[in-house]
Image (spheres, rainbow, N blue to C red):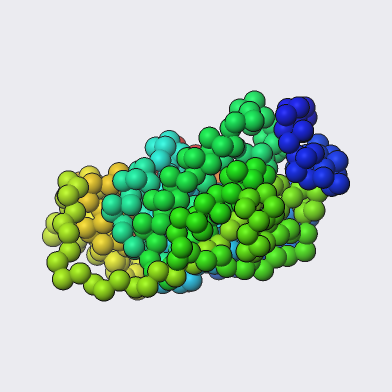
Amino acid sequence: MQLPDKFVTKYKKLMGAEANEFLAALNQPSYSGFRENPLKNGQPTSAINQSIGKVPYVSTGYYGQVNGKSLDHVTGWVYSQEPSAMFVGEVVDPQPGDRVFDLCAAPGGKTTHLIGKMNNEGLLVANEIFPKRAKILAENLERWGAKNAVVTSESPADLEKQFPKYFDRILVDAPCSGEGMFRKEPAGIEYWSPDYPAECANRQQKILASAMKMLKPGGVLVYSTCTFAPEEDEQNISWLLNNYPHLELMAIKKAAGMDDGRPEWADNNSDLKKTVRLFPHHIKGEGHFIAKLINKTPAAVPEKHKKKNKRKKQSIVRPDKTQLKLFEQFQTKVFPNYQPHQLILFGDQLYDLPLEEDKMAGLNVLRPGLHLGTFKKNRFEPSLAWALASLPDETEQVIELDEDQWRQYVHGDVINIADNQANGWYLLVCNRHSAGFGKLVNGTVKNFYPKGLRF
């Protein structure tokens, strides 16, 4: 890999005696990894058996690669993620019941980590400003089995008006110059210039300013990048501390091989040592920077008269009586213990919305919670998302598939079964993995696996 001369000069000056070791590491192979999904009931045996060891600072993390067409991956039991990036979710450490915001979330690696730690309790809003990337984010959350997650595609400046002082924890995994990913994604070198980190830092500060307006008093802000650039790392944290006096850095417990932040690369504030740097010559992973801050602003006295939201209201459509009856017929038979938050319609699509109605006003929402299914003429068809968010022991309506039958299923074929089971909808399960829904008609399972996902 040919690093830019000015990049080499910059880091020889910054890194001093360890510069040669640092630069040499950028020409070594990158590390691959994956996380297992704590929302599933059991371990992804095949993936773990093929791993090459545990990631020591993430209880669900492993080194190794995952086959994208394997049962483990297709059913959301594992998520491929670079090992250093896994540490970000550990630092955010959301708790079940929290309101959490992942402000720059696509493609969803850190987002899935967060909802797993939340045990699908509370609320996770995941935002991605670019619609195509937001669609990928929504698909990854669906496969992971996320229930209490809403995906939006908005600018931070618009979101700050919608969620003032609302979130307990906010993650800003900021778009950056990407220096820490050069050996994993060498194409990023083409975009680098000596001025690029400063340009990124300016954009990052605008995002952080919006995030601060949405953070509750007492809330926690985690800022991360995948770059080595001090302009985007320690210097941005100094900017935050200088502009928001109520913010305080929190110490991050560092694992072996993790480095303190470098105060001398900013304004010599010794508190910057509480941030963490992951260097590829010290740890089995790519370059990352992470800071964790708490908002010590005193809680505000509630206003007697709240200001009205001036954004155009988005009408919430509820299912009518006929639709509710169709849904309840399915729910009573297949998932009798499922308790939705609130049922809403997007066209003929039924969702379970975990967010207050007024927060939906005027937002571009790609995924308003868990997609439950589709209303068609005189019938309700359950979604793949609901199947992937469900565990086999949550219903008695189960058909067990072997791996050959599962391959038939994801290929879009009908499946014949020998068991004498009653006609109706069933959760299809293979090796404890909820794989989707099928409708049994006289010994034949009709296939409802989405055509766009078949392989």
x 22%, y 59%: residue: 357
On the question of residue 193 being in view, the answer is yes
What percent of the width, then of the height, locates residue 345? 23, 52
Q: Is residue 11 left or right of residue 242?
A: right
Q: Is residue 427 left or right of residue 90?
A: left
What percent of the width, then of the height, locates residue 255? 73, 65
x 34%, y 63%: residue: 166
What percent of the width, then of the height, locates residue 379? 24, 52
What percent of the width, then of the height, locates residue 409? 50, 46
Residue 197 vs residue 150, the one in the foreground: 197
Relative to 172, residue 193 above or below: above
Residue 306 vs residue 83, the one in the foreground: 306
Residue 325: name its quadrant. bottom left
Relative to 287, residue 164 above or below: below
Residue 371 vs residue 227, the one in the foreground: 227
On the question of residue 451 being in view, the answer is no
Q: Is residue 181 left or right of residue 337?
A: right
- Which image quadrant: the C terminus? top right
x 58%, y 45%: residue: 232
Tag count in the figure?
A: 0
x 67%, y 49%: residue: 265
- Which image quadrant: the N terminus? top right
